[in-house]
Image: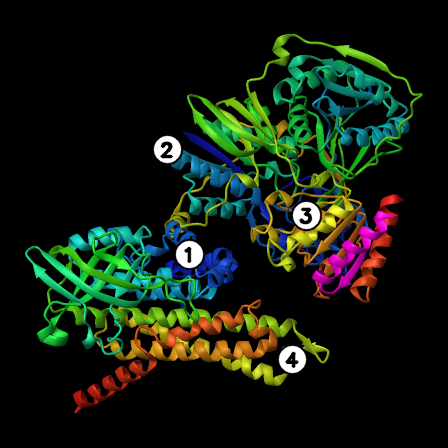
Amino acid sequence: MNIIVCIKQVPNTTDVKINPETNTLIRDGVESIINPFDTYALEEGIRLKERFGGKVTVVTMGPPQAEIALREAVSLGADDVILVSDRRFAGSDTWATSYTLSQAIKKIGEYDIIICGKQASDGDTAQVGPGISTHLEIPQVTYVKKIEQIDSGKAIVERMTEEGYEIIETPLPVLLTVVKEINSPRLPSLKGKMKSKKCEIIKWNADDISASLNDIGLDGSPTRVVKIFTPPQKCGGEMLTGEPDEIADKLSDIFKKAIVG
Amino acid sequence: MSDERVKIILNKCIGCGLCKPACPFGAIEIQNKKAVIDYTKCTFCGACKEVCKFQAVEVLEFEGPAGLDLSEYKDVWVFCEQKKGTVQSISHELLGQGRKLADDLGVKLCAIVLGDGMENKIEDIYHRGADIVYLVDNPKLKHYQDEPYTKVIIKLIQEYKPEIVLCGATVIGRSLISRVAIKINAGLTADCTGLDIDPDKKILLQTRPAFGGNIMATIITPNHRPQMATVRHKVFKEAKIDHSRKGKLIKKDYDDTTYFSSTKLLDLVEEIEETVNLSEADIIVSGGRGIGSPENFDIIKELAKVLGAAVGASRAAVDSDWIPYSHQVGQTGKTVCPKIYIACGISGQIQHLIGMQSSDIIVAINKDPEAPIFKVATYGIVGNLFQIVPALTKALQSKMGK
Amino acid sequence: MMNYLFTEEQQMIKELCRQIAVEKIKPVAAEYDEKEMFPWDIVKVLADADIFGIYIDQKYGGMGGGILEMAIATEELSWGCGGIALAFAATGLGTFPIILFGNEAQKEKYLSMVAKGTVAAFCLTEAEAGSDAGGIKTTAIKDGDHYILNGTKQWITNGGEADIYTVVAMTNKSKGARGASAFIVEKGTPGLSFSKKEKKLGIRGSSTTEVIFEDCKIHKDQLLDKEGMGFIVAMKTFDNSRPGVAAQAVGIAQRAVDEALAYTHTRHQFGKPVSSFQGVQFMLADMATQVEAARGLVYNAAKMVDAGEKDIAGVSAMCKLFASDVAMKVTTDAVQLFGGYGYMREYPVEKLMRDAKITQIYEGTNQIQRSVIAANMIKSLAKSK
């Protein structure tokens, strides 16, 4: 089974701090990690390989330093890793990003299943996975929490909804976006870590993936950021003091007002 | 490189450094008294141009796809999400905001409804502000499925050319609208918390949080149509109901290939949650590491019961297996925006704050006065939650009882 | 922080084991301690991460490291929990006899198992044979192609949970110490059983039981080396394993320093953090210095073992003695720095103190270590003359 996993390198937001004077993000020294949701996608890909044999190819689009994320993927069990990187990709929104990744996947060629995390922790859009499946014109199932079975060109999966889950049968190839419930990602192994130091990173630019220049980067992005600002900070509310009963009394009045009003 | 879209005009730049902190992506350094852009980080957002007092930043504008006549596109559309024949409350919220946008533009507000046997629900959608309802009623659209829904909406958009399409940032909405936007080469902005019309350009200003809510970005779709956006629950107020309102129904039906789905929905399983759905809840009582054990969550549940609230939890509590993951609030859990959020024994790690900081009222109960949760709290209580929470439950019982 | 100039591989082991300690062990340590459970889920994590194979030859599926690599891993895992780390460290103790004295067939079979995550145990101590191993009562009587084992081993770490037991038993009582031999016994062999788990002061996330042999019949191929080599096997095993115990002590001690530093920094009294008081600072400084000294001793002893140095009994004993005494002192100081909170089980330091105590006792009490050290000193004086 040929499995493709798409990952994104993101800043580790647990480390994100705000400069209190300028109210901007302090990005120096912020560690980059694999998007947490993508770690579930990668784990599921590796588990599928362990169950059905085959190969896990991990692809990421990003700056040259995204290589680190790919090496981490190798330490966890990925076979081939591809970095799609080009200055001309800069300014890509989700449209251009999903186009670029779908072109890379077309170049990879044979695949049975593509797995993405449900969304990235820095953008939170959840648009790139469905975008890739649309560009590739293959079916998708989003928010997958369990792959029940895969055989004879079909998969049966469970898709999370707000109320419970749906059981969906899909033909292969298919793109799945996965949620946290699907598994618990492993830690790297020593052998994997050693392999990751030496492994070759396949690097593709816009020409390698035969991308149309009108569809990548800023030119391929319908949306445009026009303004960035810091939200008004909520700061220092009212502290309630006193005996538990007094506090409870004050709070219950506040609640009553908020609920009724 | 000469083809960069953001350039520093060197003879105007005095190296004042104003642009450096303004850059949300840390892409500007001051070297030899000139601003230097690191193009591996720059996303051409233009934040530097806005703060520059010397007109030393040039941002090259991009020209849209050839042959697209933007003036052909008008009206504001809302995708009305239905489940089991019931239009979801998120759609009522979108109708409320959609009405404002349509009025600002002087165009019609239209709703799209896909389902089976939905015609008797249309009246209510008029009452909530829609001028036109596009209804595609077919047994094959009874339950949401990616492919038929995508195809139907594309056909509607191509025929009627709306300028704006709004959709809920729900499981269905996010899966559906992303596919539609790719297919018709439209701009799509996720999880908007603000939607306004630029009074001069008459385009949609979409404001959304980025980097976990630490910064806000305003996004436009200058050259593509329609302008599409998803909106999370509880961001906008539900439309007011006006029973006198009337609207026009346009029914459409398509051939079977449009309704074909290569994926098959085999079954729908509803999981009965012990309390209210977190993202829908008006009140949430959450517990964190300070709760200490699964049994201790009972006091949280009791308070939630009295308030008719949902039970939330921090990642620490979930990771300790005190409560299932479905209760987790925060970056790797659910993002919530209730009227009241009560954080008990939660220190307030950034990944938790991201998920709840836009709540109207935040109450924090923690024994550590230094806990970061107090920075976002509307009301803070430093003390023992095992005394305060039960006392609060009791106080509410007697007050609510009256 | 001291730089020990690790190789890339050693650095990788250190980072991965610390990651496991932080992400997998630390969050569950208190629960395992409380419930006195064997940490099978952590064993699986360690096996999947190739940690069990660190000190095993690559030929048998291991990573080809030595005692230093093992010490680094043990230290980091013990930082997470000294009890849980024993599933790994005591497997090393049970495996060294096979590494040091096993024939090719025994190595091929058992080392491959351990590299994949099979737990092992070493069975020497008996009720009347602790420090004085000459008092061993367990017998192994030759019976054709087999040996029949009878007797009871006491306080066996990983007892009942391990699948491989290396056992020292008397094949010829009349020869005293020279009549002892070492065997490999697999779990499931008829006649092999275990008592219920012992209730312990600390390292409660480890299993300690009696290992009972009742007409336990094993094939003669299970004999390690030759008959009569039992005590040599035991002594050489301990020379190799003592840096491991010492590393466990360093890991526990380092955790105590880290906890104490963090706590005294956040705890405010008289309007300032207690870490700003000189009395507290002096304690923190002494703790950190002692731990660093112990670590240096452990790593250097481990390097000597790996380099194949002959006279390692003395330094091996020194590092175990010093590191375990430091662990006891530093963890006691950490409890003191936490004040009343330190005495409470809700906080992590009382457990460290309980866990540290065993490192002064097992694999030879610290009194025995002193005897070994002194004996070596006297021996070398005699030699130099």
Between the residue at mark 3 and the residue at mark 2, the CA separation in whole angstroms equals 40 Å
Instruction: Say which amino acid is labelled 3.
Output: Gly
Q: Is residue A246 above or below residue A169?
A: below
The residue sitting at the bottom extreme is C385
- Labels 1 and 2 share a subunit: no
Which label is found at residue A53? 2
User: Quick one: B163 or C250, which is closer to the camera?
Assistant: C250
The residue beneath circle 4 is C276
> Where is residue B22 shown, x and y percent of the image?
75, 52
Residue drawn at x 25%, y 77% as measured from the top left: C313
Mark 3, Cα crowd under 10 Å, few <14 / some 14-19 / many 20+, is many
- Labels 1 and 4 share a subunit: yes
The residue sitting at the top extreme is B255
Which label is found at residue B312? 3
Quadrant for the N terminus of chain B, please: top right
Locate residue A161 relative to residue C215 in the image: left or right: right
- Label 2 SS: loop
**Which residues fall within the magenta stretch?**
B374-402
Residue contact between numbered discs 1 and 2, judged by CB atoms under 8 Å: no
Residue B378 in magenta? yes
Residue contact between numbered discs 4 and 3, judged by CB atoms under 8 Å: no
- Label 1 SS: loop
The chain carrying label 2 is A
The chain carrying label 3 is B
Locate residue B204 relative to residue C27 in the image: left or right: right
Locate residue B398 relative to residue B46 in the image: left or right: right
Between the residue at mark 1 and the residue at mark 4, the CA separation in whole angstroms equals 39 Å
The answer to which of marks 1 and 4 sits earlier in the sequence is 1
- Label 4 SS: helix
The chain carrying label 1 is C
